[in-house]
Each structure stands twice: as C-alpha cells, then as structure tokens.
Amino acid sequence: MSFGANSILDMGRWALFASQVQLQVTGQNISNVNTEGYSRRSVLLEEGTYIDYSPGQLGTGVKATQVARSFDEMVEELYLEQAAHKEKWGTLWEQLSSVENLLNESSGTGVSNTLSQFFNSWNEVSQRPDNYGARQSVVNDAATLVSTLKQVDTDLSLMQQRINTTVAAQVDEANSLMSEIADLNKEIQIHHIEGQNNANTLLDERARKVRELGELVDITTIDNGGGDFTIMTTAGQNLVDGASHYALEFSAPEITKDLRSTSTFEGDIYFEGNDDFEYTIEFVGSSAGSTAAGELTSDGSSAQFRVSMDGGVTWLTDENGDQQLFSARDYDSRVNVEGLQIWFGTSTDSKATPGGEFQAGDRFIISPHQGLYWVENTSHKENITPQLHFNGEENSTRLTGGSIAAMLTFRDNYVGKYREKLEKLSESLVWETNRRHSQGAGLQTFTNSEGTYQVADSAKALGSDSTGLVFGDKLQSGSSFMYVYNASTGLLTSSAALDFGGGATFNPDIHTLEDVRDAFNNTYPGMISASIVNNQLMLDAEDGYTFAYGTDSAGLMAGLGLNTFFKGSTPGDIQVNEKITGDLDYLATGHVNGAGELNPGDNTTALSMYDLREVDVKFSTITEGTTSTSILDYYNGLVGNVGTDTNRAEFNQNFYSTLANDLDERQQQVSGVNLDEEMSNLIKYQSSYTAAAKLITTADEMLQTILSLKA
C-alpha cells in the first residue's frame, strides 16, 4: 500500500465522518436533555489500522466504532430495590394518614367522646332512676355511640373496597408493563449487536418501563446482554424472561389444599363469611407421636386441626395462652373460627359428608378475600399476597415492596387490625353491658321476653364451637335466678334458679338450647312457658303471672339475649334492644332485692354500668393476644396504634426516599445530560470537523499539484 494524497484524503474522510457522528450524537443529547429515561450517548473512536512502512508505521486515521449509552447497571439494580421500599412506605404513609384523620377525636364527636357520654348518662340516671328524661338520655347516647361505631367501621370498610379497586387497576398496569418489556426484549434481540449496533433507544425505553414496574412490585433483574433480560420478584417469581412474560391476577377468595402422601381424605374444605386475614388449617396427630389425625365424625373423636392467621408462624390460642384445637365437622356441625364458619364436604357437594382419614400435617389455606396471585400458566398460580407475621416479620415468599404490596398490606394488616380491634371493642361493650343489664330490673316486670341471639342448632351444647351462638364462648357453669310474681297482687310467687334436673345448674359444655327451654318449663311450671322460635328462646308468662331476672353467674341470659340492653355484637349489627326503646320501663337501672322486690329508686345496675368505664375487661385479638384494660383505654390504645403506625411509615418513607434519591442522583451523574459539557463537546467536535475538512482540502490541493505536473 502506498501513501500519499489519496491516503490523506481517506484519512480526512474518516475523520470528517467521525466528527459528523460526534456532532449528531451531541445534538441528540442536547435535544433530549429533558426527556425522561434518556441516557447520555457518546461516540467511541478507535484508531485506524497501522501499516508498516518506511520510515516507520503510519496510521490510516480514525474509526467511529459505536454509539455507546452511559448507564450504570449496578446502581440501577440498587435503585430498584430502594425505590420499591420508597413506594411501599410512601403509599402506606398516605393511606395511614387518612385513617389518622378518620379517628381524630379533636372534633368532640369521635368514639372516645361518645363512649364517655354513654357511661356518663348511666351516672345521671343512677341519681334519678325513675326519671324518664334521664332514662331517655341513656337510650339516646347509646344510639349515638352505636351510630359512631358503625360509621367508623363503614369508613374503614370503604377504604378497603377502594384499595381493591386501586390494586386491580395497578395489577392491570403491571401486566401491561411486563408485556411491553417482553416486546422490547424481542425488538432488542433483532436490532442490538453488541459493539456494533447498540439499540440504545430501546434499552432506554426498557429501563424506563422496568422502573415503572419496580414502583408497583419489588423486583430484581438479570441482564445477560441484549434481549436476554429477566425480571423476577424479590421472592423469586418470574415476571419477564426474554421475549416471554407471565402475569399477575387479583382474584376472588380461594382455597388451597396440601395433603400428605399418606392422607386418604376424600373431599374439600368450605367456608362462609369473610375476614381480612388468611387462614392456615393444619391437622394434628390424634395422639402424641401419631401421624394419623382421624376421620370426620359428629362426636368428640373427630380429627382436630389448629389454625394460624399469619401463615403458620403462630397458632390461635385461648385466653390462657393454650393452643386452640378445632374439630373437623360437616355442614350441619360447622365450626366457628374467628370470622368464618368452616366445614368439610365432598368435592361435588359441600353439604355431603366426606370420607377418608386426615393425616397430621394435612393443610388447607383459606384466603377469604381478594388476593394477588402469580400466574405461571392455566394450571398453576401462586398466592403472593403480602403477609405480615404477628412477630412483625414479612413473609419473604410473597410481595414485600412496591405500591401494590403497600395497598394490600394496608388493607389486611393495618385496616384489618384496626377493624378487628374495633370489633372486639364493640363485642366487649355489648357483652359487659348486657351481662350487667340482664341481671337487673327496670320499673316493671315482664309478661314476655324474646332472646335476641340465635343458635345454628338447638340440639348442640351452647358452649361448643359449632353452636353458632355469638357469645357461646363467654358462658360459664353457674346458676341463673328468675323471679315470678302474681300479676294481680304483685306478690312474689317463685324465686328459684333454673333446674337442669335434680338440682343441676347450667353447664355450657353439656346443655343445649332445648335443655334451657325444658329447664324453664320444668322449673316454673304453669308460670312461665318457654319455646324456641327461629332457634331463639322465647319466654311467655302464663295468665296471671309476670317475671323478672335475677343473679346469673352463668351469663346464660346475656348469652341468649334475654333482658339485654344491646342486640348484635359487631359495629355493623349492634343496636339498642327494641324492648327498651319501645318502653323505657324495661331499662334496667336497679335489681330485684333479697325480698324479691323491684324498687323504682334502686340504682344498683345503673351504677354498675357507670363503673364499667374504669373496670378492666379482657380483650383477645389474633394480632395482639389477650390484654386486660378498660373499654375507654382500649379504644384510646387503638387510636395510639394508628398514630404509631403512621409515624413509622413516615420515617421509613423519608429514609428510603433519601436512599433512592441518592442512587437516582448517582445514576444521573452517569447517564444524565450536562448541557455545559455538551456545549463544550460541540465546540470541540466542530473544530475537529473543520480540521478534517481542512485535511481533505489539503489532500485535494496535493492531488491538483500532482495533476498539474503531468500536464
């Protein structure tokens, strides 16, 4: 190869081309300085081939080898992790702030204030028990309290419904992003040739969409170059694999069955009701060291299972801290577990009795609300709904970051916890009030009394977990006294405790609603007629008699809803008994004294109600166990929980925002466009272009000189 004007001309041509490309890329950088997700580009130059020549090696110029994209993959991976946490805690903080505003007591119309007013009204009526104005105030303040509890619970429920709508939209958005990223991977596979033709625009677009996906769910990425790009959740579920993608599904309540290989059970589990927690049902051995759990029977020999509400980390216990065991039952004997009725049936008929034997370790998982699932194919999907164990740790096999995880965590673990505590507050308020009221007396005796609480089966023991009685677990063994009067003279006719045969008192583990009916009819023959209507107890005084209620150490009357102040048990169904709102005489402010007399000025029950504001009662929740405190302090503790949770979310949001913003800034230092730098480059490349053009001009002049010599 010879050197001369032609080689100089080629050298100038390549230099001109390199400078032209540099100017074009610089212009691209400048024009996209405000484009979101744009990564700064630069032209990589490579010295031309060397040729051995005399007097030594001579170069052939410069080559523009590739347009490179400035992007730090490691920093981006770290950013995605922190951004998912930032979105999670930021969303939680926003949502929790709305709950904090909802429970704000500063307006004077909150639950705490209406509770205090309710108790104060009992103090006022205790000073004037026979004053109808004071008695009406008790009813009015109770109605206000009921309305406030119902409104707070309704607002919390609406928050959960709104969350479901938002999550459904975000799941659709996540699925759309996964599909678009897979399509981009396919395009990158076609257009990207490493080191020769970098698909920079497609890579930027993919990185931008990955960031958007990372704000919805916590993800990790594996980039093997080009379109060989994989996205997984932090827990390991594959979302995008090259040109393929999977899907997320926000679906209705579902049941998962996981039986041991030795299990012969032939059937399925069923449930009624709804709850904010997931139920893990696990069967236990029938005896120590046994792998057999037993069969489904209607007696005490039935297979037993334990229940966890946090994925099997902790198991439900009773008030004494002992693990609770429940018996496997069919539909007619279905078991009440927290908020659900649970039973077993055949695979084709929920009300038929299944066969086979359970083995220890047989598991069923009930998700009684809408949940998030990772869908691999039409035959396999996996529950990835965020789950918080009661020890404070997150279930690492589920989603743990991103706004979708935040929304579902808020719905279940925060609002679910608040609603559970509000329900326990209502339940304790109703039970403690009714417990006192049912043993009290108003200004007149009864000619009839209707129980307000229903059983599922009148032939089952009232204390069993399948009786369906709301307060069945509150019943105790003890005596229940009644007083019967002559309607004409008002004189006491009978003052006896219910006799369940041979002087036996009530035992909740044995006696059924039918036994209670028979005990009334046998203890007060010809005076009180007891019957069961719609699985509720009805008492009617025979002609010429009236009756009143007395001391009830068993809690039987309160449990059945006889002579009670409240009906229902939850914020959604609690109300003042119509017997009282229809006739204020039946508001129990006093009691029947030792002589069997009703004294209009007696305030025993009213004072007992007022004392309830300070009396410690037991509250048992699945998240916090059993605590003992007053009703007012318990609610104030709920408000305090919301404040603490909100402050924690705010702190974490600030913490992870700082980390994410710092990493984003580091990425921008690498990939962001600096106009000062680009303007400097523009001048430099323009000078290079001018110099290259001058080189070509010089080569042309050399050629012209040579041509003129020939002439």
Image (cartoon, rainbow, N blue to C red):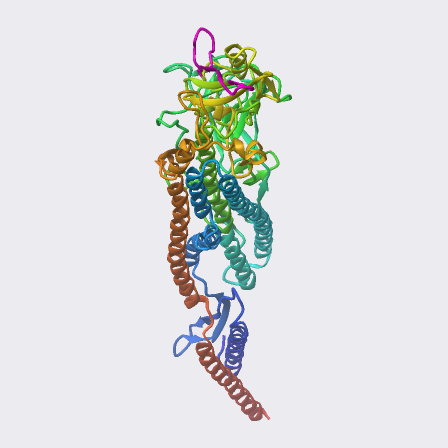
How many circles with numbers are drawn on the protein?
0
Q: Is residue 22 above or below residue 231?
A: below
Q: Which residues are magenta?
A: 485-507
Q: Magenta stretch mostly in which secondary structure?
A: loop
Q: Residue at image x 53%, y 85%?
A: 693
Q: Position of residue 91 (x, y in %)?
A: 48, 53
Q: Position of residue 706 (x, y in %)?
A: 54, 89
Q: Residue furthest front?
A: 489
Q: Residue at image x 39%, y 76%?
A: 56
Residue 576 relative to residue 400: left or right:
right
Q: Quadrant of the C terminus?
A: bottom right
Q: Is residue 616 above or below residue 592?
A: below
| Residue 222 seen from this side | no
Q: Position of residue 226 (x, y in %)?
A: 52, 55
Residue 577, by quadrant, is top right
Q: Nearer the viewer, residue 116 or 328?
A: 116
> Is residue 513 part of the magenta span, yes or no?
no
Q: Position of residue 556 (x, y in %)?
A: 47, 22
Q: Is residue 71 above or below residue 140?
A: below
Q: Nearer the viewer, residue 16 or 682?
A: 682
Q: Nearer the viewer, residue 619 or 136?
A: 136
Residue 80 relative to residue 374: left or right:
left
Residue 613 relative to residue 521: left or right:
left
Q: Residue furthest top?
A: 502
Q: Nearer the viewer, residue 440 or 657?
A: 440
> Is residue 488 part of the magenta span, yes or no?
yes
Q: Residue furthest right?
A: 348
